[in-house]
């Protein structure tokens, strides 16, 4: 075997490596495209969930909270708040969420304060529906701990 690294060897490594990673990319893309329908819950979208998402965006909730790992880490992760605070009971969660949002800001010393958005009961219900819907997405056990 030659002790020299030739242009031909470099070319073969370049093209071989490029082809390997291109095939890897195509394979991972195919895997993702086939796995997404099994993990999402698009069939459970309702007008209330869509309105809740719009409220989430209009009030810039992601400016402080994270949702499924995306957003700011100033306030708690809300991708699993339905499981944490509602015990996976929709009525319990809606009552909790409504009371929590109406109690803001609490004025507790030493705590960061969430602003009062003055949302109507219908808007609070729709925002709760959005958070319930989000919690039902298969996220491969994200976040890694219960409290986000």
Image (cartoon, grey):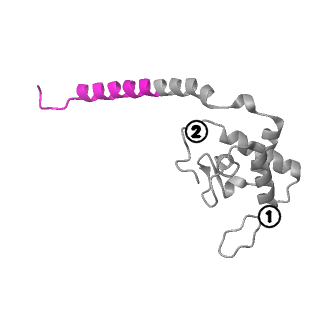
Horizontal and vertical percent position of residue 16: 33, 24
Horizontal and vertical percent position of residue 37: 62, 26
Q: Is residue 34 left or right of residue 19?
A: right
Q: Main secondary structure of the magenta part?
A: helix
Question: For residue 26: magenta?
Answer: no
Element at badge 2?
loop
The crowd level at tag 1 (other Cα within 10 Å; few <14, some 14-19, many 20+) is few
Query: Counting residues from the N terminus, which is met first, the one under dot 1 or under dot 2?
Result: 1
| Numbered circles on residues, count | 2
Residue under pointer 1: 103
Residue 54 showing in the rendered view:
no
The crowd level at tag 2 (other Cα within 10 Å; few <14, some 14-19, many 20+) is some
Residue under pointer 2: 139
Question: For residue 7: magenta?
Answer: yes
Question: Which stretch appears magenta?
Answer: 1-25
Determine whether 66 is above or below 41 in the image: below
Determine whether 3 is above or below 91 in the image: above
Query: Looking at this view, is 50 or 9 the one in front?
Result: 50
Q: How far is mark 1 from mark 2, CA to CA?
A: 30 Å
Horizontal and vertical percent position of residue 9: 24, 27
Q: What residue lies at 55% left-to-right and 44% top-to-bottom? A: 142
Residue 29 showing in the rendered view:
yes
Q: What residue lies at 46% left-to-right and 24% top-to-bottom? A: 27
Query: Looking at this view, is 27 or 8 the one in front?
Result: 27
Element at badge 1?
loop
Placement of the N terminus among the 4 image quadrants: top left
Instruction: Determine the image quadrant of residue 88.
Output: top right
Horizontal and vertical percent position of residue 84: 64, 50
Q: Is residue 124 left or right of residue 33?
A: right
Q: What residue lies at 71% left-to-right and 49% top-to-bottom? A: 86
Q: Nearer the viewer, mark 1 or mark 2?
A: 1
């Amino acid at each position: 075997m030659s002790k020299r690294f030739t242009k031909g060897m470099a070319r073969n490594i370049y093209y071989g490596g490029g082809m390997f990673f291109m095939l890897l990319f195509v394979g991972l893309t195919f895997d993702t495209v086939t796995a997404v329908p099994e993990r999402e819950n698009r069939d459970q979208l309702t007008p209330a969930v869509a309105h809740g998402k719009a409220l989430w965006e209009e009030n810039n909730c992601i400016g402080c909270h994270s949702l499924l790992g995306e957003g700011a880490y100033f306030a708690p992760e809300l991708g699993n708040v339905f499981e944490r605070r509602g015990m996976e009971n929709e009525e319990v969660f809606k009552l909790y969420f409504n009371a929590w949002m109406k109690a803001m800001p609490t004025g507790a010393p030493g705590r960061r304060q969430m602003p009062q958005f003055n949302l109507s009961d219908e808007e609070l219900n729709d925002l709760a529906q959005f958070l319930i819907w989000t919690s039902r997405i298969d996220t491969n056990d994200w976040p890694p701990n219960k409290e986000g």
